[in-house]
Amino acid sequence: MSPTAEHFDVIVIGGGAAGLFCAITAGERGRRVLVIEHANRVGKKILMSGGGRCNFTHLEATPAQYLSANPHFCKSALARFTPWHFLERVNRHDIAWHEKTPGQLFCNHSSKDIVAMLLADAAAAGVTIRTGCSVVQVEHADPIRVATGQGLVTANRLVVATGGLSIPKMGASDFGYRLAAQWGLPLQPRRAGLVPFTLHPPVLAQWSPLAGTSAEVEAVIQAGDQNIGPAFRNHMLVTHRGLSGPALLQVSSFWQDGAELVINWMPGAAILEWLEQARAQTPRRKLKTLIADRLPLRLAERLEQVLADAAVPMDGTIADLSRQQMGQVEQLLGSMRFQPSGTEGYRTAEVTLGGVDTTALSSKTLEARSVPGVHFIGEVVDVTGWLGGYNFQWAWASGWAAGQAV
Ligand code: FDA
């Protein structure tokens, strides 16, 4: 490596949400900071997030909405840098926002507002950003040496903010995991999260004709009859490849090979009581028209077919149903089981579960215990939020925690 390296107090590898926020925090503390980004621009995932409107935080974010082998790890950073702190910055920049569901904040206009805010604050804090810059080698020496495609740079502190594996075409790489492995840090297994499910061909053939149909459901993952993770009530969407929509993206983070997806098509309804009531009040109605009262017609027709396959007669009246058949209807509408063939994987996943094992890091500074001066932040760490702005909140909070320490 050339001896005439440019020196910084802090080098951040990765110009995404966490890296930029860490750089701003450190820069505002007077540190001389360099951000190295291998893509042609920073913040690409921010730009595509929230359907182009960036769901930049969730006001009710608590550690309970994060998955990690150590659920306590995220507590310190989340408590010290809260959604209100981030919102204060958004408001300072006069970015118009709205609350979509309670606590879930989106830009009114565009995700570009958040990237513009970060770039403005980075410039004001004197942060140097190099895009289109690849990292060739990192050497943990004193100072830390980073060989890049644009020359050698050195720093007293290095922050690894290279994100997860999702959406490779946006610049995602396994670089952070490889660096962690290079220094002997443990890694939790990685897998795609917040990702649509795929179905086995015969099941897909039954459901894909409904592609585009959406309904509010309650979804949960079960192994045997044990729930894995919480149940989520939200929309589900049938696609050409399988099942998606926010409720299903949420539970996908809890799914493991072999586990089943269980859908309640009538969330919040006491199905048996509803049937009893219909039997008492409108005994001559047909079950299929009753179901179509509550669900989109195409979906009601599909469920009708599923019930017919289970030998529940669909042509007779509700009064014709036996007690046992009413129980079957309750079972199928209240907990229909799917065995996914898998997920769509990193191509469409919003996040990567797993990553740098938190036992290797300080929860206060995100510094690697065995590699002094090196910090890991954001999605590369084994902390993954639910859908709803929680992942950005982790990026801001972990970036802030490291930015305070470097
Ligand atoms: P991020 O991925 O943002 O940044 C990592 C950066 O490092 C990238 O710019 C990458 O190019 C760069 N990099 C990687 N390897 C490198 C290398 N070797 N050298 C140099 N640079 C390198 N979350 C949320 O809270 N609300 C939302 O609305 C959404 N919406 C959403 C939509 C979609 C389609 C996706 C894919 C994801 C979301 N998310 C989200 C998740 C959110 O985008 C994600 O959790 C954060 O961007 C993670 O921030 P990081 O900075 O850790 O990684």
Image (tube, helix red, strand yellow):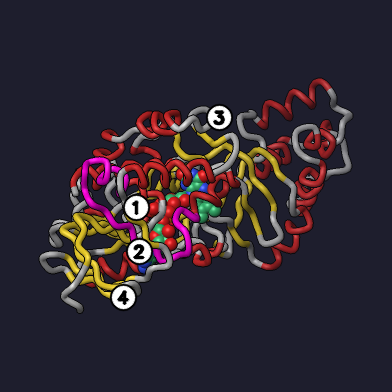
Q: Which of marks 2 and 1 is nearer the N terminus?
A: 1
Please state which of residues 129 and 274 is positioned toward the viewer in this rendering. Answer: 129
Q: What stretch is highlighted in magenta?
A: 22-44
Identify residue type, mark 4.
Val
Separation (CA) of disc 2 from disc 3? 36 Å
Q: Earlier in the sequence, mark 1 or mark 3?
A: 1
Q: In what element is the residue under mark 4?
A: strand
Question: At 53% from the left edge and 48% from the top edge, which residue is drawn?
Answer: 49
Number of residues whose C-alpha sits closer than 10 Å to that of mark 4, classed few (under 14), some (14–19) or many (20 or more):
few
Please state which of residues 309 and 347 is positioned toward the viewer in this rendering. Answer: 347
314 sits left or right of 173 in the view: right
Number of residues whose C-alpha sits closer than 10 Å to that of mark 2, classed few (under 14), some (14–19) or many (20 or more):
few
- Residue 194 visible in this rendered orientation of the protein: no
Picture coordinates of residue 363 (x, y %)?
A: 21, 46
Mark 2 near mark 3, Cβ–Cβ under 8 Å? no
Q: Considering only vertical position in the picture, is 367 above or below 258? A: above
Ligand 1 within 8 angstroms of badge 1 C-beta:
yes
Q: Earlier in the sequence, mark 4 or mark 3?
A: 3
